[in-house]
Image (spheres, rainbow, N blue to C red):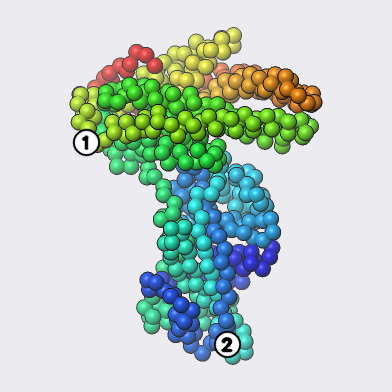
Amino acid sequence: MDARGAFARRLFLGRGISGTILLMTSPCAFIPPVGWPESEHDLTAAINAVRGSLSADPAEVRTYPLTLRDSANYRLTRGGHRLASFPAGGDRETWSLATLSGTALASAEVPSPAPAFDNELPMGPLRRHLEALSRGRALHPVAELQVRETVTALRDAEGKIRCRIVVTLATAPDGDRAVDVETRALKGYEADARRVRATFEHDLAWPATDVSAIARIQPAIVSVPGRIGADLRPDDPAGPAMREILSAQLDVLEDRLSGVLADRHPDYLHQFRVAIRRSRSALSQLSQAIALEGRADAIDGFRWLGRVTSPLRDLDVQLLDLAGRRARSDDDPAALDTLERHLLALKTAAHRDLALELSGTRFQSLVARWRDSLSPSSANWTATASLRAPFTEVVSSRGQNLLRKALRDGRRIGPDSEAEMLHDLRKRMKKLRYVTEFLGEVLPRETTKPAIRALKGLQDVLGRVQDREVQVEALHGYGRALASGKGDTAEALMAIGAWSEELERDRRAARAEFAEAFETFAAKETQALFHGIFNGRGDPRHGSTTTTGKTPARGPKED
């Protein structure tokens, strides 16, 4: 680590990190007047006003970029955390996890280029924290700011450092800035630091703060959409409530668009497609809660979006799986390089095609028309009795219908059943999950999370059966393409064959696990979770009635 990196690391990690030479108490920072410091004279004057009998060293100044990282859906920020990274010198970076107020939790040095996932970090506290917080989601840059640290050491008559005054200036790309001034104590000299702090607080009348300058500027540069349904209640009319949820999905779509167009990271496209699927599910499964205006065009438009985004997403998944295979197989690295180059060439073409589609008039018109249909001023959202019915009643009715059909279909599947039957059940389970998640937007999360977790167990098994089949077919296609080209591809074809066999074994294993997974899903304890949600506002203690106490109406005959 070079001197610049070590200096930045010492300053940035000093707040709340045990084992440093700095002993911190809270609050230890102060907010100076607006515009301070305008010049070096301002800093000198402030230090002279608080140093008392101590002498001040010449200030040390370092400036470095600070990158804020998060998942595409801002899982860390939503959970009250901030992940930042900055150069540590050479080919390394320092990553630091803190609360949004600035209290440091863990840190580690990582090699450049920066890893994308928590399991690529060095073993230690930071990795353990992020594995629990990010749950396997990609962690990529979401914002960058410039940090200027100015440190002045205060010494006694014998030349011993008694404390340090640290001025942190954080500047956003648009020029907004935040400043704080810390007094950092050294072990054994806490009294000097307390006296300097008291002078800042009482003589200069600077307000103390627990929130760092970086934490204060973060909301201005990291825009996190609020929770869907945050202002909704279970008994709100179905139409307006569904309009809010669909509007939030459209917000996600527009927010992730720039990352998709720039191919910033596969997570952007994944979140983009999740918003598409949720919108499609609502449009098809909850037609009673959606106004007729614009619905048919939206169904057609979102179906088209799902279709045009599939090729790139499939290649993203294949490349991620290829990276995993490198780590666990004995395949010839050169053979996998040949396959990777082929996949990357296909991805470049697929991304070009998708970017053209998403930059065209069809996509822009779809978004504009659907946004207009979702306008709060539209009276169509309360035009019918079903649109005015309680949201939970309408959604729960559909959930009960899907649950009943999922149980019926699952019980018909035996060891010799056609793969298509498992595929149909998987689609049904997806619909059930989205409907349950819609209820999770207006009910306490602790009532819906256990049911969704149980549902995902069966989904995972069904997904492996279907996905492995699709992957094997895709690999065979890549093999045929490589075999028809020029050059020596024998090793690549052998690697594809070995990989295909591994995937086929996993498909068979997942197929064998289906009966047990379905039995767990269909068990009385699991079903009680869903009945509690669909029959009584998510509280299993309620009886078998809807929120209005009436027998639920049957949902659409077609799924």
The dot on residue 220 is none
Q: Nearer the viewer, residue 80 or 324?
A: 324
Question: How many angstroms separate mark 2 from mark 1 (CA)?
Answer: 69 Å
- The quadrant the N terminus occupies is bottom right
Q: Residue at x 77, y 34 (%)?
A: 333
The image quadrant that residue 556 belongs to is: top left
Q: Which residue is mark 2?
A: 156
* Image location (x, y in percent) of residue 73: 47, 42
Name the amino acid type tagged 1: Ser
Discs 2/1, front: 1
Q: Which residue is mark 1?
A: 377
Which badge, 2 or 1, comes first in the chain's sequence? 2
* Image location (x, y in percent) of residue 160: 62, 84
- The quadrant the C terminus occupies is top left
Question: In this orientation, does residue 497 appear?
Answer: no
In the image, residue 191 above or below residue 422: below
* Image location (x, y in percent) of residue 121: 64, 48
**259 with respect to 544 (left or right):** right
**55 with respect to 225 (left or right):** right
**SS at mark 1 in the image:** loop
In the image, residue 85 above or below residue 507: below
**SS at mark 2 in the image:** loop
Name the amino acid type tagged 2: Asp
The image quadrant that residue 538 belongs to is: top left
Q: Residue at x 74, y 20 (%)?
A: 483
